[in-house]
Image (tube, helix red, strand yellow):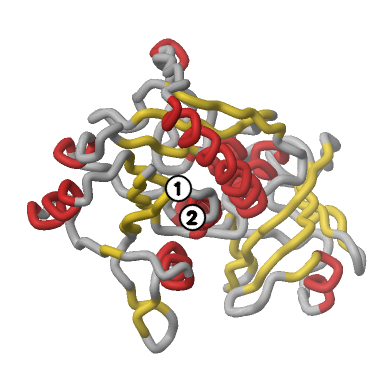
Amino acid sequence: MKIIYMGTPEFAVPGLRAIAESGHEVTLVVTGPDKPAGRNRNLHETPVKQLALELNLPILQPASLKDPHFIDDIRRLNADIMVVVAFRILPDELINAARLGAINLHASLLPKYRGAAPINWALINGDKQTGITIFQIRPKVDTGDIIFQQAVEIAEQDTYGGLYTRLSNLGAPALVSVLNKLECGKVEAIPQDPSQVSLAPKIFPQMGEIDWSKSAMSLKNLIHGLSPIPGAYSVFGKKRIKFLRACYSLDDSSEMPATIVIRDKNHMGIQTGSGILYPQELQSEAKKALPVAEFLRGFPAKIGDRFQL
């Protein structure tokens, strides 16, 4: 089939590679504009653009998906289908611009976690299972009929970064399988159950500030759900410390939340509103992330000291 592939971040890279190597024809790759990044603000290409250049595929980077010239360019390709992975919301004029419309790979078991940050919220909420969904795109975001789903278990030590990679790699062969079935007309689409809908709104950096009055379990989930970016954090002295991985116990001390109650050369335990949080990987401002034992070598805190509550 003739395919238009739309995606921007690293999550969309395995899918593009798998489709390009599958025998289907990728007639166009649509991705985000190059953006300034780094200290020198040099323009950086999106991960999807980098792969498209490597594969010598045609690329468009529209500033607006509603640009009539861009929409005309898409229609003139007479593509069989558009595949959308971690991209922008398609305007109504684009959804049916290909013969079979458009499909989307979403990182949750829809209708659970519709929205921009399904992986983050699955971890923040302490879910034990998530997965991927491939569905037909409709005008209302993440509401289309389901073509394919696959569940995965969430391990206790999974973080956003690790689960992001795992689901991205899982989605790549699934996209190829769905395209093969669509080509043969062997796809059954199932409507989403509106009674099971939940939302996964966009994550903002300020959401990472640790509230030590909460339970150790909920803070561990927050830390893993925001690791490595944007990161959960707390202030010690005048320095912001990012927490990237943690475990916890249900034990409690008599100290107030945010107090360091355990401290030796390899471990640190912090009292929370319920239970003790044990950081396993931390990062000081402008420093690299370190396992807790290495981090503590240069960290002056002692038992009884407190993080900012």
The residue at 43%/20% (across/down) is 197
- The answer to whether any part of residue 222 appears in the image is no
The residue at 60%/59% (across/down) is 228
- Label 2, secondary structure: give it: helix
Residue at the disc numbered 2 = 20
Residue at the disc numbered 1 = 24
Q: CA distance from mark 1 to mark 2?
A: 6 Å
Up-down relation of residue 143 to residue 280 (above or below): above
The residue at 72%/40% (across/down) is 216
Using the image as rendered, state which of residue 99 and residue 121 is in the foreground.
Answer: 99
Residue 301: quadrant of the picture: bottom right
- The answer to whether any part of residue 256 appears in the image is yes
Q: Residues within 10 Å of mark 2 (few under 14, many from 20)?
A: some
Using the image as rendered, state which of residue 58 and residue 248 is in the foreground.
Answer: 58
Residue 247 appears at what percent x and percent y?
79, 46
Q: Quadrant of the N terminus?
A: top left
- Label 1, secondary structure: give it: loop
Q: Residues within 10 Å of mark 1 (few under 14, many from 20)?
A: some
| Residue at the extreme bottom of the image, as rendered | 40
Q: Which mark is residue 190?
A: none
Residue 12 appears at what percent x and percent y?
48, 53
The residue at 43%/86% (across/down) is 39
Determine whether label 1 and label 2 are within 8 Å by CB.
yes
Residue 111: quadrant of the picture: top left
| Residue at the extreme left of the image, as rendered | 68
The number of numbered badges drawn on the structure is 2
Report whether 18 appears left or right of 137: right
Residue 293 appears at what percent x and percent y?
86, 68
Task: Report the amino acid beneath label 2.
Answer: Ala
Up-down relation of residue 191 to residue 175 (above or below): above
Report whether 108 appears left or right of 243: left
Task: Report the amino acid beneath label 1.
Answer: His
